[in-house]
Amino acid sequence: MRKLLIPIVAMLPLLAGGCIAKTAWDVATLPVKAGSQAVDWTTTSQEESDRNYGKKMREKEAREGKERRKREKECRKSPDSCGAYDGYRAGDPG
């Protein structure tokens, strides 16, 4: 029994060597991966920034359209009181 047990125990590190090395590598690189993930969570990518800007511009354009429709409706009711449109414009800063 003892003769059979010694070769098995001696071969165990060779058989499990890949797993041990992989685990050691994962443990060593864990802080770097965690740090890069934290940076990803706290920064805004260019794609996300573009998406947010597009959404904001669509909302502004919808607001401008709503205001223009309201003004047109009021002008149809009383055309004498209508002048040039000086309301909200989506491209205006502010």
Image (tube, rainbow, N blue to C red):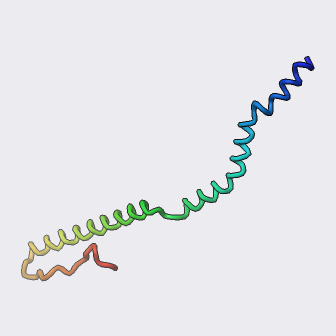
Vertical position of residue 6 compared to residue 40: above or below: above
Identify the image quadrant of the N terminus.
Answer: top right
Q: Quadrant of residue 67?
A: bottom left
Residue 18, given in percent of the width and then of the height, sits at 71, 37
Residue 83, given in percent of the width and then of the height, sits at 12, 82
Residue 48, given in percent of the width and then of the height, sits at 43, 61
Vertical position of residue 60 compared to residue 86: above or below: above
Left or right of 29, for residue 84:
left
User: Nearest the camera: 53 or 20?
Assistant: 20
Q: Quadrant of residue 91?
A: bottom left
User: Nearest the camera: 15 or 67?
Assistant: 15
Residue 44, given in percent of the width and then of the height, sits at 48, 64
Residue at position x 38%, y 63% in the image: 50
Residue at position x 72%, y 37% in the image: 19
Left or right of 80, for residue 4:
right
Identify the image quadrant of the C terminus.
Answer: bottom left
